Amino acid sequence: MYHRFCDHESQTPSAVSAGALARQIEYAKRHHPIIDCNQQFDDEDDTPGCAVVFTVDDGYRDFFTTAFPVFRSADVPVTVFVAAGFVDGAYWFWWDRLRYLTENRENRRGTLSLPNADPAIDVDLTKDDTEVWDAVSDFLVALPPADIEAALDDISIQLGLPVPKDPPAAYRPFSWDEARAMQEAGISFGAHTVGHPVLAKLPAAEVEEEIAGSKAALNREIGSTSHVFCFPHGQPTDYSPTVERIVEACGFSGCYAAHPKLHDRDRYSSPRYGVSDDIVDFRWKLCGAERLYARLSSSLRGKPAAPSHGAAPLGDLPGN
Ligand SMILES: [Zn+2]
């Protein structure tokens, strides 16, 4: 599972450089069958257990500029799960707006009061940008979507820095024209909601609108969509059995979460493993060592294992 790409050595855990991506694809081709995500679910009985599926979430433009040429040249299947409203230009992600605010703030003294926090939380603005971003995003991610927007407005005012309506280049999506061009070159696209909300926090009718709406947008813009859906954020508390049933009712044959699981055959919350520039970590995950480690931990503790520590910063968390 990938999210962001960069041209040179990665500075963040969730961005993978073009060179590292090429080495990872080459390694996977040499040691594993590589299949499309539709095949994983539609031909489940015929799929080898060691098969690898490449997926990319969200629809950032760095997929088009950096990763697409690498996947095309390697000639391996990959599916990009698109947040339809993001590619439509309706919004840019809240974690990127927060990053814009923390990196461009002139206010580097005193504290930032997190809106409506109970008990009150004051973030030390003398800390570096990453520490401020971490503290605020930990607070925002637990809020309902509307409250996140209100809190970001409040934070923008406290920092004296307006957020531009359109994202700076680093946070832009690819366009539908670019998606169509990539599709003609063999890239697959899948639904990932319209607004990228935490689905478990929404009433059932809104969950259905988000899922069906993103499927309809893909069919309208590029004429097809993967048979597989992908949860936004995708951590264990971000979806529920009700959400899984709605995904199935919307006609999908499977669905991805964004964390490792002991039961890797859960069709509507299938595990995924986030990867970084680190080829050793990549090999570790491809050979199944992380899953084996989780199973051993679980049996030693006598209870289900929590997602591994290695997965958390690379999953579909804020910033991903
Ligand atoms: Zn996402």
Image (cartoon, rainbow, N blue to C red):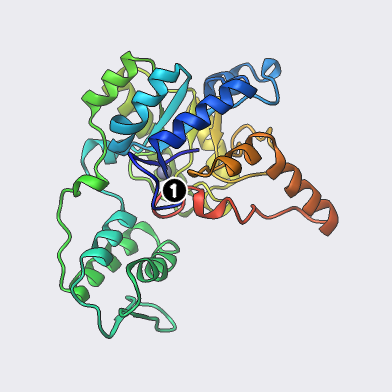
Looking at the image, residue 225 sits to the left or right of residue 175; the answer is right
Look at 59% across and 44% down and name the residue there. Answer: 281
In the rendered image, residue 225, in percent from the top left (x then y), is placed at 40, 22
Which amino acid type is marked by label 1?
Ser
The mark total stands at 1
* Residue corresponding to mark 1: 14
> Which residue is located at x 46 percent, y 54 percent?
201
Pick whichever, 143 or 99, lies toward us: 99
Residue closer to the observer: 161 or 287: 287
Tell me the quadrant of ligand 1: top left
Label 1 CA crowd tier, 10 Å (few <14, some 14–19, many 20+): many
In terms of secondary structure, where does tag 1 sit? loop
In the rendered view, tell whether residue 240 sits above or below residue 248.
below
Identify the residue at horizontal 23%, vertical 31% (top origin): 175
Q: Answer whether residue 97 is visible to the viewer in this image.
A: yes
* 157 horizontally vs 136: left or right: left
Q: Nearer the viewer, residue 28 or 152?
A: 28
Q: Quadrant of residue 302?
A: bottom right
User: In x, y percent, where is residue 202?
Assistant: 44, 51
Give the side of residue 267 with respect to residue 122, left or right.
Answer: right
Relative image position of residue 133 (x, y in whole percent) = 36, 66
- The picture places residue 198, in percent across and down from the top left corner, at 44, 51
